[in-house]
Image: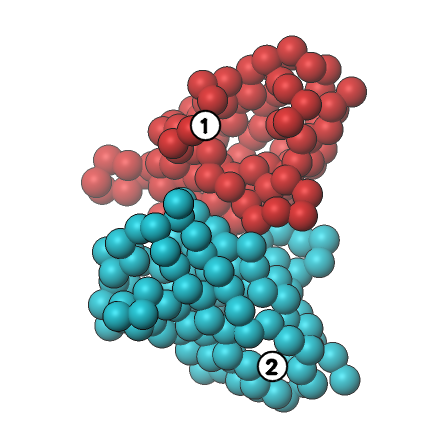
Chain colours: A red, B cyan
């Protein structure tokens, strides 16, 4: 199984500052179709996960451009610019390169 | 508006069975792979199973293979998860998703 390791496990951010979350994969997530099968989700308390970023860097419909995904191969980063109070929750990376689909352990973001 | 609504969650004894349903509206259900993802209390999401557009291809997490069966009825815009030989460790909220959109989840509790 592909293991996704997220760091840090938690993050406290001042509003307006930038937060970065790392996700490292045990195998490359670059498929022969040229796409990187790495996704980012935000799960707010009491809610299901919501898709933020698909295939490494594509923002899902309605996601503010403050959220950006980057990386390559096995190392990935989610950056949240100009953090707002509504960004609190737990962020997960997920891979669909290989079954079973797996998730990272999560990064809990709180606002200072 | 896109909606995924799960139903069928319950408290069951170890060894028991349960069938979850998910009714989808707002998008062309028959065009998408669909998955069940579960989340135990305080844990991250865990992919359980998925099914292709016409229901002919199915994949499962190793720990549920042979006990759970995923199916769909495109005429009813519905996804199902038949769960048998339930274990305490199957306790979780079960989400229906295509990963772009998620339902609110159905709670399954396995306890004697």
Horizontal side, residue A27 vs residue B14: left or right: left
Q: Secondary structure at mark 1?
A: loop
Local SS, label 2 = loop
Q: Residue at x 23, y 68 (%)?
A: B54
Total count of labels: 2
| Residue B55 location (% of width, % of height) | 27, 70
Chain for numbered disc 2: B
Residue at horizontal 63%, vertical 71%? B108
The image quarter in which residue A7 lies = top right
On the image, the x and y values in percent for residue B79 come to 39, 68
A48 in relation to B60, above or below:
above
Q: Nearer the viewer, residue B24 or B98?
A: B24
- Residue occupying the far front of the picture: B1
For disc 1, the marked residue is A63
Q: Which residue is mark 2?
A: B86
Residue that sits furthest to the bottom in the current view? B15
For the C terminus of chain B, the image quarter is: bottom right
Where is residue B48 shown, x and y percent of the image? 48, 65
- Tell me, yes or no, if residue A101 can be seen here: no
Nearer to us of marks 1 and 2 is: 1
For the point 43% across and 24% down, the residue is: A70
Camera-side residue: B62 or A111? A111
Up-down: is B104 above or below A45? below
């Amino acid at each position: 199984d592909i293991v996704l390791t997220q760091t840090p496990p938690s993050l406290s951010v001042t509003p307006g500052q930038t937060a970065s979350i790392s996700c490292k994969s045990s195998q490359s997530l670059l498929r022969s179709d040229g796409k990187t099968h790495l996704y980012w989700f935000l799960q707010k308390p009491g809610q299901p996960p919501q898709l933020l970023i698909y295939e490494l860097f594509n923002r899902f419909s309605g996601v503010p451009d403050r959220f950006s995904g980057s990386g390559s191969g096995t190392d990935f980063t989610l950056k949240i610019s100009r953090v707002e109070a509504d960004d609190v929750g737990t962020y997960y990376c997920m891979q669909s390169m290989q079954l079973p689909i797996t998730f990272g352990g999560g990064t809990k973001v709180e606002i200072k | 508006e896109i909606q995924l609504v799960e139903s069928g969650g319950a408290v069951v004894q170890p060894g028991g069975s349960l069938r979850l349903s998910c009714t989808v509206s707002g998008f062309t259900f028959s065009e998408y792979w669909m998955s069940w993802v579960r989340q135990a209390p305080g844990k991250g999401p865990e992919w359980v199973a998925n099914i292709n557009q016409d229901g002919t291809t199915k994949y499962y997490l190793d720990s549920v293979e042979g006990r759970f069966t995923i199916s769909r009825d495109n005429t009813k815009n519905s996804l199902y998860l038949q769960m048998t030989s339930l274990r305490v460790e199957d306790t979780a909220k079960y989400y229906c998703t295509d990963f772009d959109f998620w339902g609110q989840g159905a709670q399954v509790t396995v306890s004697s």
